[in-house]
Amino acid sequence: MGQHSDEIIERWMAKRRATLVLKVLKGDTSVAEAARQHELKVADVEQWRDQYLRAAENGLRRRPKDEEVLKDDQIKKLRQKIGELVVENDVLREAMKPYPLAQGMSDA
């Protein structure tokens, strides 16, 4: 049997994620180092950090928002970011028009 069958699979439950995020926030480790050390994706650790900070901010409100409102706020911010990226992409595409070699790459 392989080494993996003998190892205990560690689950990333909320408490464990929070502990890791706190280490990142305290500066004990970086996001990249935490991800590497625990064989996680950097994007996952960043997402956990962002969720933790949103929840903490909401917890400190006089009247905390419910989860649906938080999700709606996040969707609104993401849609705004998508819009910004679309505009940026359009500007770059226009800037590339005078360069014939770049036209084939811009459609990729």
Image (cartoon, rainbow, N blue to C red):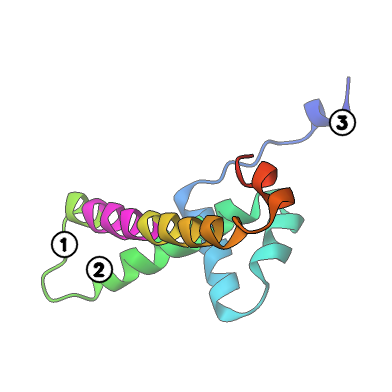
**Separation of residues labelled 2 and 1 (CA atoms):** 6 Å
Q: Earlier in the sequence, mark 2 or mark 1?
A: 2
Question: Looking at the rendering, in which quadrant would you find the C terminus?
Answer: top right
Residue 6, above or below 71: above
The quarter of the displayed image where residue 31 is located: bottom right
Name the residue that disc number 2 marks. Answer: 58
Query: Magenta segment, which residues?
Result: 71-81
Secondary element under disc 1, as helix, strand or loop, is loop
* Side of 61 relative to 107 (left or right): left
**Separation of residues labelled 2 and 3 (CA atoms):** 43 Å
Q: In this rendering, which labeled residue sits more in front, label 3 or label 1?
A: 1
Name the residue that disc number 3 marks. Answer: 3
**Separation of residues labelled 3 and 1 (CA atoms):** 46 Å
- Marks 2 and 1 in Cβ contact (< 8 Å): yes
Front residue (pair 58, 17) = 58
Residue 97 in picture, x, y percent from top left: 59, 55
Q: Is residue 47 magenta?
A: no
Q: Earlier in the sequence, mark 2 or mark 3?
A: 3
In the picture, the disc for residue 9 is none
Residue 105 in picture, x, y percent from top left: 68, 45
Residue 96, above or below 10: below
Residue 89 in picture, x, y percent from top left: 50, 56
In the picture, the disc for residue 65 is 1
What is the crowding at mark 2: few (fewer than 14 residues within 10 Å), some, or many (at least 20)? some
Residue 45 in picture, x, y percent from top left: 57, 57
* Side of 73 relative to 2 (left or right): left
Q: Amino acid at mark 1?
A: Lys
Q: Amino acid at mark 2?
A: Asn
The quarter of the displayed image where residue 16 is located: bottom right
